[in-house]
Image: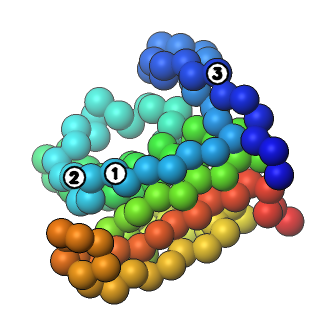
Amino acid sequence: MRCEPITPRLYSPNSSHPLYTSEGMANPPFNVDLVDAERIKGDPRLPFGLPGVNKAKKVSNGNYLWISYFWSYLNDKGRAGFVMSSQASSAGHGEKEVRRKIVETGDVDVMISIRSNFFYPRTVPCELWHFDRRCRG
């Protein structure tokens, strides 16, 4: 399949034209914590909601923020692959609800579990996630 050319545009919360892409690949930082939930609660890049907000109004683990961002940047035929913490596929509470909504879109193509010590010099296990909006229905 031939990829469409991408014209990069920076996303701005005040912009009505966020970046949409046909393909993406990323290795975001795992388990970023204490993200200010009040600051991001209306972000259009989070269509599945916030993944678990604690009493201090902080998102306690940002893995599903990254996952939602990747999904929201894809165009109608977009694909994305990214490395994610192995904890993301088994997380509970708010993360579980966001994961359920993402799976229900039909855009999750595959999730591959990678054992410890696969990536040098990191020893933690991880997962490879793939979204493919062409696979719907």
Q: Earlier in the sequence, mark 3 or mark 1?
A: 3
- The residue lying toward the viewer, choosing from 88 and 9, is 9
Q: Which residue is mark 3?
A: 7
- The residue lying toward the viewer, choosing from 4 and 69, is 4
Q: Residue at x 48, y 13 (%)?
A: 14
Q: Which residue is mark 2?
A: 32
- The residue lying toward the viewer, choosing from 110 and 13, is 110
Which mark is drawn over residue 91?
Answer: none
Element at badge 3? Answer: loop
User: Residue 36, position in %: x, y?
Assistant: 22, 38
Number of numbered tags placed on the structure image:
3
In the image, is 123 to the left or to the right of 19? left
* Front: mark 2 or 1: 1
Disc 3: CA contacts within 10 A as few (<14), some (14-19) or many (>=20): few
Which mark is drawn over residue 28?
Answer: 1
Based on the displayed image, in which of its 4 quarters is residue 23 positioned? top right
* Residue occupying the far bottom of the picture: 115
Whether residue 45 is visible here, answered yes or no, is yes
